[in-house]
Amino acid sequence: MAGKTFLKRIDWLSVFIYFALTAIGWLSIYSSTFTESNPSLFDFSTFYGKQFFFICVSVIAIVFVFATEANLFERFSGIIYTIGIVLLVGLFPFGKTIAGATSWYNLGFFNLQPSEIAKVATTLAMAKYLSDIQTDLRRQKDKLYAFGILIIPAILIVLQPDPGSGVVFFALTFVLFREGLPLYYMAIGLVVLLIFVATLKFGTIWVIIGVSILIALFYLTKRERVKISPLPVVLFFAVSVLISFSVRFVFDSVFEQHHRDRFNLWLRLEKDPKKLEQIRKTIGYNTYQSEKAIESGGFTGKGFLQGTRTKGDFVPEQHSDYIFTTIGEEWGFVGTGTVVLLFSILLLRLVYIAERQKNAFSRIYGYGVISILFVHYLINIGMVIGLVPTIGIPLPFMSYGGSGLLGFTLLLFIFLKLDANRLKEWD
Amino acid sequence: MKKVLLSSIIILIGLTFLGRLSYLQIFSFSPNQILEDAAIKAIYDYPERGYIYDRNGKLLVANQAAYDVMVIPRDVKSLDTLEFCNLVGIDKSTFIKNIKTARIRSPRLPYVMVSQLSKEDYARLQEKMRKYEGFYIQKRSLRYYDTKSAANALGYISQVTPADLKAHPYYTQGELRGKTGIEKQYEDVLRGRKGVKYIQKDRFNRDIGPYKNGTLDTLPEPGKEIQLTIDKDLQEYGERLMVGKHGGIVALDPSSGEILSLISGPTYDPSLLVGRKRSANYSKLYYDSISKPTWDRSLLAQESPGSPFKVINALIALQENVLTPEDQIRCYNGFYVGKNRTKRGCHCGGGLRDMNSGIYKSCNAYFAGTFKQIFDHFDTTDEAMDVWQKHVKSFGLGEYLGTDLPTGSRGRIPGKEYYDKIYGDNRWSWSYIVSLSFGQGEVAVTPIQLANMTAAIGNKGYYYTPHILKKIEGKPITNPMYTQRKYTTIDKENFDPIIKGMEAVYKTPGGTAHWLQVPGIDIAGKTGTVENYTRINGVRTQLTDHSIFVAFAPVENPKIAIAIFIEHGYFGGRYAGHIASLMIEKYLKGEITRKDLEKKMLEKTLEKEYAKPFSGEPFKINERSW
């Protein structure tokens, strides 16, 4: 392969954004874990020192990915997936438990988190299966098979227990929709979610009234000639009411108090502002502190290494899941806005790249990458700024964590490699 | 459609995030962050409060150390509670209650376990302190009084209230601030400026180093020492004389307006409002509604001035050329006023009076006649009233004097509007208000106004606004309010016959203070005996007259002008006159030659008189014997 033409074909914009985000992330980790007594930049006992090492490892991985034949990723996807699953299963006897979750292998100098690798493996396997000429998502069996690919690692991860990372695999369902799963599945999911939230927020009666109004509007606006049998409409109504009733039951009787508190907080269900404030400061402590830290940054921020809340360690897990608060406090709206813009541009760019793939495997894999990155970005930043309930997953490329960084790097750069290779014939 | 869907969601989420971030960081952002930031603690370094000295450089107020026992609940290990309680002088239930409160506030932060230990307790505790883990002793600075006098004038300091905090952002919770008297008036001077260190904290409230390397920190500015115009010896002497008497004494230096003493009786030891028993003592003083020790009578009591006011009427008569000092008026052991020729009494013995004898015998009839002539001199009563009021007010009466003390009263010099309201427009004349001629009726003044009036007479027509601050850090005050003369509307030469009359009060046999002369000092003075009433169970009841005296000395270039007001002391020549005589001698000579007179004043009290209205039984007033 002629190196020059290959380099030309790489999407340098994505590469640039990747390195920009990684650099901002590393600076923020440095700022949130730096202490006056330990000023050396590359001390490997510190978080920023380790992260620097992982960045170097990631760069080596990038070179390695670029040097690999593109079609090998497709050919070995099954094996990679199997290795991923084996690693996940192996955690149960051999894993190392940190903070209650058995999610790591102790490799001496660092802990490997196989769930991060499983994200790459599952995306590859999903792309491989869906791009197979014999797969037809209209068939129930294939639907179940495709779903099985993502549900197996998800369940294994939830059992660790690391429910946050498990949830991420469901992001891959988005790929299924792109590849032929009818959109009404998504619609049903959205309606159930909507009824759930609406019931908690406004109560069952209002949900029934709302649904009735919707049906009435539907009949009023439909064209005369279109005949619709009343059965599905009645069914829709009945199911909505049933869900609405069961939501109250589930919420009051099945949920535990700490679940209820998260919803109380998220949907502002508590009416008494004093009690709400109390919940914010106790159960919502993390979000309360992260919001306060971001808020205190103002428009331009307090300056690099000047974040008082960052220095004071007010935000828990600030170097990993809450890394965004450091940017918020020290770089202000300018910094947070830049990060949001970078992520948005990267994701849109990847959508554009995915759509230009002639090869189904590359395209589907691309969508998988986008879905996984997007869900991480959505949940992490959403959680940190108080829009999404607390779910502990890292911010891609930025949060501290070697496995995570390596996983996201492989995920992205395999796709960029496939893209660079798109005009070549597949043999 | 599916192609666009994902891109649209990405853009939508991006916009949502930007919206939320701008809400947090732009709209909710508060620029006043350094004080609100939970991660920054301000540690204050309090300078020592300035000392207060008297006019001769004698110490009045300094500072003393006090010791608070602090506790950090988390660090407390098991201890012999009973022994500890005995050492610091609290009981066990207080101990348990305080520990509980401290724990609720924060297990990591210090809390005052026992405040303001005495030196003795501190000494006993100090050597055993290491036994009690989690406890330590913190030094505080309190006021120390080198005198038992001038409590009201000096005032006190106490912790800022929530209202203070709102009005004065300088202060933070728990700081001390002057509440009354000089401590309040010169708070900014005495207090200095606290220094501040900003400390970076972690989420456990532990210090982790200076904020921004201390670039925002400031050093404390020490409080300034001040010198008062008060003469410590005179003040203390006056308060000794006032024991058992209610009233006020104000002594001024007429040549400068400096307040030499500001005495309110009964008073209290200013040290009572310092230390652990402070609040108990304060309640006791504050709720004493009979003797009202915290109410500064010298500045606030408004009473009719009585006979000293006669000289003002005489001055007005001379100024308006309505009579000469030699003009005579007959006293019929009283005088007749109004259509019905009602007789009003006089105690001077009757006969022909000129201005001199009118003053030294304090003849009511003479001044009623003078008053009539003033009003007859003008075309209308209104015009006469205006002129009269203008002259009286030029002596600093009827309005706030503008002293540099935080309290004061206006007093009352009524004008035509006042009487129009009572009697109706043009429905009154001089005979209605003739009581004003001898300082009774609607007119009211405070002791400090009376002293200032006396100073103006002594100066023959001008005064300096009375003030109590002499120097700050050795530099004399320059405020023109207190260094510029204020002139009365009476010409200088008109004062001579008046001052002669006031001298005669002492020097002429039959003068109302003849027996109170101070050997070797020429004094000009005037007695006053003021009828007064109170309500007992809704019935207007007359009480024993107030005893009033004003004087200045020496007559040429007076160095002291004094006004004395003794509640229910009967004749002006009794309590007030005696005290005035002693105070003047004390100030000008430094010692008292008439020991028997002094002994009498130190021993006599009026407690019996003050108990009368509360006894619930009928009582006699103005008793001859004393």
Image (cartoon, rainbow, N blue to C red):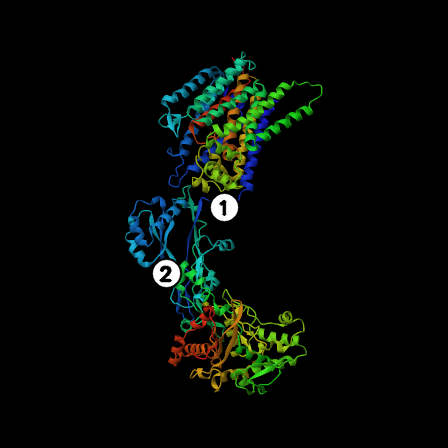
Report helix, strand or loop for mark 1.
helix
Q: Nearer the viewer, residue A20 or B260?
A: B260
**Residue A217: x %, y % from top left:** 66, 26
Q: Nearer the viewer, residue B534 or B360?
A: B534
- Establish if A297 lies above or below A240: below
Residue annotated with mark 1:
B33
Report helix, strand or loop for mark 2.
strand
- Which image quarter: residue B388? bottom right
Write down the chain letter for disc 2: B
Count of all numbered marks drawn on residues in the image:
2
Is residue A409 left or right of B332 when viewed as pictured?
left
Residue in view at x 59 percent, y 79 percent: B316
Measure the C-alpha gap from mark 2 to mark 1: 36 Å
**Residue B357: x %, y % from top left:** 53, 86
Q: Nearer the viewer, residue B157 or A218?
A: A218
Residue furthest front as drawn? B617
- Establish if A398 lies above or below B214: above
Residue annotated with mark 2:
B64
